[in-house]
Amino acid sequence: MNNWIVGNLQASFDTWNEKLTEIWSLVTTTPQAFRGGEIWNTIVTINDGLKAFGYGLLVLFFAMSVFRSAASFRDLQRPEFALRHFIRFIIAKVAVGSAMEIMTAVFSVCGGVVQSIMGCIGGMSAASVTLPQELIDAINNVGFWDSIPLWAVTLIGGLLITVLSFTMILTVYGRMFSLWMYAAIAPIPLSTFAGEPTSSVGKNFIR
């Protein structure tokens, strides 16, 4: 039973280390390199297809903003009024056209930050968990009857470690694919920046 206890703990720690390594690979791999880039190519294709809709909505939101904020035709003739809306339109157009490049730059910066942090703490080898030899020896020296409660605690602890490791990896996968989907549909919500009344939609999307 003692050997089973050690084996169960070691198996749980191996699962934990495996998922940590996978998470490290996910957060440091560029979207273009993940799974050969096939998923990212699909995201880019969707983004390119939605740009046309984004530009159409851009003009619509811009026109709505101009006519809603102008109290009279005289306001449309004011240079500061026209300049303010023109700058907003240009910024929104750049955001719609460069959404994918912006997201790629953000991913690269985040990956570099993670690599720097892990480099400072010694890499994945420092974050991995191993079973100390002293603990192995102590478990092997425990008698049969004393090992029964230890066996129960080990079973619960191993199960908890396994569940936590799978929860972490699923959370990382979920957040990663959510960000990629946001990048794919980015032209639509970013086009709302062309109008003052609709700009709150774009702000909520960025958040």
Image: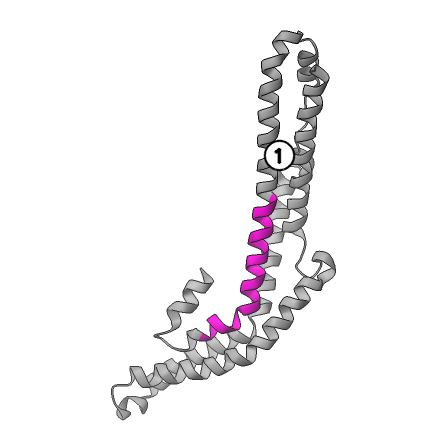
In this picture, which residue range is highlighted in magenta?
169-191
**In the depicted structure, whether residue 200 falls above or below residue 24:** below
Instruction: Say which residue label 1 marks.
Output: 162
Q: Nearer the viewer, residue 53 or 124?
A: 53
Task: Work out which quarter of the rendered image holds the N terminus and state it.
Answer: top right
Q: Is residue 73 placed above or below 179 in the rendered structure?
A: below
Residue at the extreme left of the image, as rendered: 71
Q: Is residue 174 magenta?
A: yes
Q: Residue at x 61, y 38 (%)?
A: 165
Q: Nearer the viewer, residue 182 or 33?
A: 182
Colouring scheme, one of rainbow, by chain, secondary structure, one colour: one colour
Image point (67%, 62%), residue name:
39
**In the rendered view, would you say 145 is above or below 192?**
above
Measuring from the top left, give residue 189's x and y in whole percent. Answer: 47, 70
Furthest-right residue in view?
Answer: 36
| Disc 1, SS | helix
Amino acid type shown at disc 1:
Thr
The residue under the point 44% across, 80% down is 89
Residue 143 position in % (x across, y down): 66, 7
Q: Is residue 50 left or right of residue 17?
A: left
- The picture places residue 145, in percent across and down from the top left corner, at 63, 7
Most frequent secondary structure within the magenta stretch: helix
Q: Is residue 62 visible?
A: yes
- Residue 123 seen: no
Which one is in front, 197 or 114? 197
- For label 1, count other residues whose C-alpha is less than 10 Å away and answer few (under 14), some (14-19) or many (20+): some
